[in-house]
Amino acid sequence: MESQNQPVTLTDQARALTRGLTARVGLALHRAGVHPDTITLAGLAVVAAAAVLIGRGEMLAAGVVLLAGLPLDALDGAVARAMQRQDRFGGVLDSTLDRYADAFIFSGLSYHFAVQGRFEMMLAALAALIGSFVVSYVRARAGEAGLSVKIGLFDRFVRVVIILVSLFVPALLDVGVLALAVGTNLTGLQRLWYVYRNIN
């Protein structure tokens, strides 16, 4: 049996660095009457807009839109904590819409490559989408079984960083998509192996 001690991920570090700011903004939004589910839905709308821009080949504009929408991904949870939300629907909604967001981005990339006749890169984008889903799915199912799984480099925060870099530096787009295609699937398998070794 392997140790179940989890590493401190880049996502954990980013949350720790921004926790104070997001808490203050979340409290202010709560006092202004903003509901956390509204922020979650707004975040998905921003990603959908970025996905359309990606499909049109407007990578820099898509990167700007995605970057501008990033705070929404943290603020819904901050507002929920400020209002001392008791029900669990918010977490389910957030996780579900995160999967839609992944699908939008990689669908936009797949369409972009397809209209260029670059079907090998279209398949790479689809492979990255599959890997992204597996990474999240293994963690969710393991959590239902009482096992926390954070291992592996390609968590959602790292995927977002790679996508943003690829959009802002289009010369790196192919490299970024290929890295995501390989890295997400390796992380998914790594998490599955961890669950196999540690599940009760």
Image (spheres, rainbow, N blue to C red):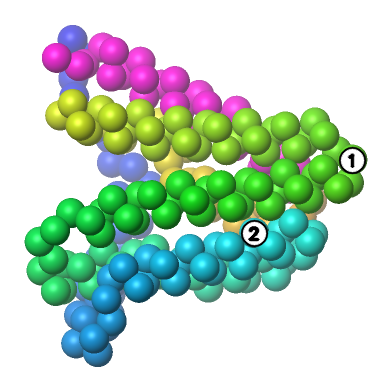
Check disc 1 and report the residue beneath it. 117
Which label number is shown at residue 51?
2
- Magenta span: predominant SS is helix
Magenta stretch in the rendered image: 173-200
Vertical placement of 149 versus 72: above or below?
above
Vertical placement of 68 versus 14: above or below?
below
**Amino acid marked by disc 2:** Ala
Please identify the residue farthest to the right as the structure is shown: 117
Asked if marks 2 and 1 touch (Cβ < 8 Å), the reply is no
Looking at the image, which residue is at 25% across and 28% down?
142
Q: Quadrant of residue 178?
A: top right
Q: Quadrant of residue 89?
A: bottom left
Does residue 168 show up? no
Q: Position of residue 120 (x, y in %)?
A: 80, 31
Does residue 167 show up? yes
Tell me which numbered mark, 2 or 1, is placed earlier along the sequence.
2
| Quadrant of the rendering where the C terminus is positioned | top left
User: Left or right: where does residue 176 sit relative to residue 156?
Assistant: right
